[in-house]
Amino acid sequence: MTPALRFLRWTFWQWVFGLVMLGGLYAAFVRYTQGLGSSTALSDLFPWGLWIGFDVLCGVGLAAGGFTLAAMVHIFNIERYKPILRPAILTAFLGYLLVILALLFDLGRPDRIWHPLVMWNPHSVMFEVAWCVMLYTTVLALEFSPVVFERFGWHTPVRWMRAVSIPLVIAGVLLSTLHQSSLGSLYLIVPHKLHPLWYSPLLPVFFFISAIAVGFAMTIFESYHSAKAFGKRLEMSLLTSMGRVLAVVLLVYLVLRGQDLWRLGVLARLTEARSETYLFLLEIVFTLGAMLLLFQQRIRTSQTGLYFAALLYIFGFITNRLNVSITGMEAGSGTHYLPRWTEVMVTLAIVALGFAIFRFAAKHLPVFAEEKPSVRMAAELVRVKA
Amino acid sequence: MAKAILFDAAKCIGCRLCELACAERNRLPYDEAIAAEEQLSAHKLTAVQTRGDYFVRRLCMHCLDPSCASVCPVRALYKSELGPVVYDAERCIGCRYCMLACPFQVPAYEWNSRLPRVKKCDMCFDRLQQGELTACAQACPSGATTCGDRDALIAEARRRIADNPDSYYDYIYGLEQVGGTSVLFLSPVPFEQLGMRARLPQQALPTLTWRALSHIPDIVTVGSVLLGGVWWITHRRNEVAAAERAQREKKQR
């Protein structure tokens, strides 16, 4: 077969990827030549749709594994999680880059994305989110940089990065805490629009806790797929204990949510036969289901069991973010919103791009090849002796 | 002195001259088809709506503490001293958070433009600065739309209700909604019947956001001390453990 015809031998997933990217490129062409009016179902009454609800709100949340694992390994010194830290940092870094890419589609004037750098409004949640995302993306680039340096055998910069790693991780955790919760604060100003099943003064707290939870779920998800793709052994004991942490975080989250709904007296709304009710229940079923599964040791220690429990919560998380940004906003805005194909296509292409870049980076960079804890321990021993 | 607009639904005859004057002042097209549109949009910054036997105007309410200005990340929107909430298109990045946040769903977007802007009534800011009336107030033949100092207009509204208690629903809309607005409404019927949001909080909405945002300095200071402390403790524990192990091995030898 000639090289030009090599694409005929693509696997099923390569074909899917190719078609999605092609569709995404066409959708991008429509977006940038004809504007948001022709490429989205957005309107004056419903100005934020799928690109904010999924690409930004879910994208930032799904990338939360980076800061939780960095904190566990570097701050709490739980060394045994180290083998899965790098893939988590890579996921987070890619996640944030893709969120910025999505913003370039959604912003009416993407050429002015830098304006918040010089035009300040400290009273705006969006201003805070913009700064945090920008700074945290920089932190992630620095946290990931040793992987690239190692690949090319540049030892001096690796030493520099090691020297600043602790302040960097602390900055990363703080920035993440701030903007993960602030994505919830974005909706504090619309008590009259957001449905009472989701509106709460505690929105920032809920967004933060669920981001931590989905960070763990994503780490399990991506470890499972990486093991499959690269024929590696799954670090099952690590992931099992992470599954238990996830179950506890979900328990805290669900108790707080339930208590808050009770306190605000909105549980009676669940008797209404409306789409809000069903989608709220769907979100809770996913979350509660994942938690119940993860509290069982039999599930936690099984590869597929753990994987599906994590996946279940990832769905629960996505449903929650779409409920806050779309389902819960429709009635209060007096309109309906169904994304146009161009919006869906761009979103799919961005997700596909994320998978592809992760695969490429994992293949060509030492993402999984971490130094063994025993080697490190021995080195430390030598140092202490000397 | 802060300027304001008073709209009196009891006096409005639905002639739509305010719409025409507004379109002319903002250099927007206006014809019969556009006159028939009753919604605000990027080409219609005020709209006269027919609600039963009455007419009611829709336009930017120019809140005293506007949500749109508070949420804008680049301060493209701001409340001027003179009263109007003004928009600077050169700063706007098009995030459309103002549209999401506005409790009256006023800001509109140029969806079909490749360099889109937010469009909304600016209470004829330039005209007010020169001491003129807004274009709509000047055009109104029936006295339904008037323009002046907010305090004077509130007094005028109270006088109208007191003089003709039978013709008015006893309430001034805009006095306390979301902390007060610079556009005030009088009506012969309850305001829900004019299609206006009646159940808005009396508190300015930006205070809801500020309550969360004001925690940031605490989170940063407490957080960094806490994380640094945890790191120091766990790190020290590892060091001590390593040293003790080394000592044990020395003894064994």
Image (cartoon, coloured by chain):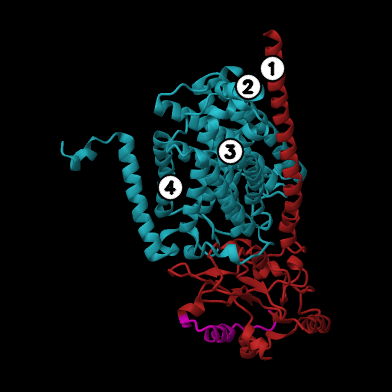
Chain colours: A cyan, B red
Q: Where's residue B167, x and y in %? A: 76, 80
Q: Residues within 10 Å of mark 2 (few under 14, many from 20)?
A: some
Same chain for the residues at labels 3 and 4, yes or no? Answer: yes
Quadrant the N terminus of chain A occupies: top left
Residue A375 in magenta stretch: no
Name the disc covering residue A162, or none: 3
Residue A306 position (above or below residue A356): above
Please give the chain letter of the residue carrying mark 2.
A
Which residues fall within the magenta stretch? B9-32
Name the disc covering residue B245, or none: 1
Give the residue pinned by disc 2. A381
Quadrant the C terminus of chain A occupies: top right
Q: Amino acid at mark 2?
A: Leu
Q: Where's residue B114, x and y in %? A: 43, 68
Give the residue pinned by disc 4. A350
Residue B31 in magenta stretch: yes
Tag 2–tag 1 contact (CB < 8 Å)? yes
The residues tagged by marks 3 and 4 sit, at their Cα atoms, a distance apart of 32 Å
Q: Amino acid at mark 3?
A: Arg
The residues tagged by marks 3 and 2 sit, at their Cα atoms, a distance apart of 19 Å
Residue for point 62% across, 50% down: A183
Residue for point 53% across, 53% down: A52
The residues tagged by marks 3 and 1 sit, at their Cα atoms, a distance apart of 25 Å
Q: Amino acid at mark 1?
A: Arg
Res A214 visible: yes
